[in-house]
Amino acid sequence: MNLDDVLALAAERTPTPLERARARRASRKIQQAYAHAATAGRDLVVDVDPHDPLNTDADEAARIARAAQLAKLGTITWISASGEISWSDEMSLILGCAPGTVRPSTDLLFELVHPEDAHGVRRTIHSAWREQTVKETTYRVVRPDGATRYVHCYIEVLIDRFDQPHGIIGTGQDVTDLELARQERDRLARRCETARTELISRDPATGLLTRPRFADELDRTQRAGSGALLVVAAEPLNLPNSGHDHATQDRLAAAIAGVVKNVARRTAVCGLVGPGEFGVLLQNTTMTSATTIAESIIDSLRSHSFVVGQDRERVRLDAWGGLVRYQEGDDSSSFDLLVDAESGWRQARRQRVALTVLRQPARPEERQETCRSRIRAAVAGNSFALYAQPILDLSLNQITRQEILLRVLDGTGQPVAPSAFLDVAERVDEIWPIDRWVIDHTMELIAHGPRTSHYQVNVSGRSLGDPHLLEHVYEVVKRHAIDPSQVTFEITETALIGNLTQAIDFACGIREIGCRLALDDFGSGYGTFTYLKYFPIDLVKIDGDFISKIEESRPDQVIVRSFVDMCRGLGIRTAAEFVESEATLRLLRDYGVDFAQGYAVGKPTPVGNAHRALLGSAEIETAELGPALRTAIG
Amino acid sequence: MITNSSAVARAATRSTEPTPAELDATFAAFCDENFLRVERFLRARCTDRDLVDEAVQETFITARAKWAQIRGFEKPLAWVFKTARHKLLGQQSRRTRTNTTTTNLDELPPELLTQPTDPREADELLVAWLQQLPPRQAEVFVLFFDGWCDLDIAKMLGLAHTTVRAYKQQARQHLQRLAEQAGFNKPTTGR
């Protein structure tokens, strides 16, 4: 069957008896309605052309103009023989001229058409004339008073009695509202496509809420009533060598998370609040039942054995818990409660019990003191390690830099990500000793490393205000006879919010010493373009959130490309974090990003543990910087 | 199919003033005869059945009010078509000022995608296809399909003669594409 068959079949259609009956019913209804209206004396023919459309003496142009007028559309007529142009009153209004005040002419018409659209309009008219067919076009009119309107026009070719083209008629209407609505629909569709409304809120390995999101949840439930917060820490009693790589640790964390979720009530909110630390929110529950749940979670973790690695070695865990009760109207913030529960499990570990239960949140001074002493102990005990992650110069295609990263050693001496630890340190104002530790050990490393490499080191926003910071940097640089231009200090944009004056003082001071300055995690926090304008930044590191999925994400591509353009215009270099594939590297190089960092370039590797760093053995350190550094030398 | 009263009969009706009863009777016959055709014409350009029903109803009431005059036209139905379209356009611009209605193939009832077996099904399929065309092309095509000549169509729709020719051709090409998309691309053999 094809179109002709369908048309032929359709042409045979005759009304069914049912349809006929419907037509008769409608007909009766119409006659009744007419009789009703006639008796009421209503005017039924208003706004209707009473003439016979087929029996008209008017020529084609006049006929179309009249139809347009009834439909409240404007017309422009052009007759080829005389070259004369005329337009209707309605069209005059569309063009923004009071009817009769201007003499229609082609020149005037094209003066009123927006310059960017004039060429298109001419082309459309010419092609309509040439092909003797109807065309349509939408263009802007700039009225004499300056207002811009969108006008849609059908362009039709008029023929005479001998079927010869003799003119053109345009039928137009102001479609500004429609056009704006269309543009808005397009924009919304594009926005729908590009906006990801879901925040990154879950840890990719365990699927649990991240620390900040878990804290948000805690805040919310805290407002809604009382309950208990449990933080459980799990540490492997025996970790085989195969268990040290990232992937295995992620799998182990996921398995532990599974056990915790299983034992906790199905509705309980769980989060990964630190490395090996799991938060469980027990809402609307008595302390007795919360304690029971906490104990059974710890028991399950202790009795569970996990199998890791290719050798299928068994790993047993030790676990401790800190349980703290909260009530509506407590002064404690979600951060306070987290710190209390964390201190709780530490206390349990010290006292060799499974669980510490706090019937209420700790007193603020007490909490502050607990945190401080923990941090001081860590600094005093050198419970840190430095890692270096290679950074690729995309234009040279060589590793020319390293970012020095801090790791905190946990109870078993395992290096873990420091964010939870630093979070506590910043909040209790104990970050300066940690920053000083990092600066000291990094500078020592640089002093013994090759002079050609460049190092990027992080410093906390809280330390920027410390008057000792600049002094200390200056002194260490001098002591080790380091070329200061080998060092870039990375600060996060959150740091700038605290005290902009202090931050600017630091920035200017650090550049005076001769070091460089980078803005870290740009785009993810509260950073504004103001910083780019007023801050003497040398490098901006684009937040990994914009990079990790950039291959398939159009929004990320648009943002990164424009941002790189902007930075180049400002004389700021750009770096991308979380570069995880070759394809991403190529894309970033195309965009003109200067540096790339991430697993596709190289993972962070230890640069010698704390004790070795302290000893300052040049041999060990350069050897342990690995092949990445040698690339730079070569 | 177009009812053409002879010139003689037309002259006769004009000369004598018709009685109200006579007007009622002739209008009722006209309405019974053409109601479905007018409805079908509007459906080709508008998918909203309520709007169509309303426009058809109003048009016929107006036609009844003017019946004494338009019954004398050569083809009263041309006037009704033109007026019905005018009413529909007015309603459309009032109701959906910002909303352009487009129908996708996906929205077609699935039964329409199987081969039509009788004229009614074939016609419904055609209307469904017409509703996916630009409205001006659709109404030109439906009038052409209804048996009107190009010039009459041009006059009823307020278009240039050349435009009607162009739209007829464009509509045909468009329908061809839709038919092929729906799998109607082989002529029936031996039908």
Image (cartoon, coloured by chain):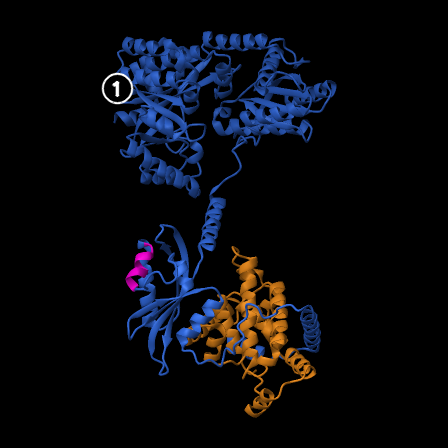
| Chain coloured orange | B
| SS of the residue under disc 1 | loop
Which residue lies most toward the bottom here? Answer: B8
Residue B125 visible to an observer of this rendering: yes
A539 over A608 or under it: above or below: below
Q: Position of residue B141 (x, y in %)?
A: 50, 74
User: Which residue is under mark 1?
Assistant: A451
Q: Position of residue B79 (x, y in %)?
A: 55, 76
Instruction: Indicate the amino acid at tag 1.
Output: Arg
Q: In which quarter of the view is residue A125 placed?
A: bottom left
On-image quarter of the C terminus of chain A: top left
Name the one closer to the observer, B32 or A173.
A173
A476 over B29 or under it: above or below: above
On-image quarter of the N terminus of chain A: bottom right
Is residue A32 inside the magenta stretch?
no
Name the one closer to the observer, A568 or A301.
A568
Task: Name chain A's colour.
Answer: blue
Prevalent SS, magenta region: helix
Q: Which residues are magenta?
A: A106-114
B50 over A358 or under it: above or below: below
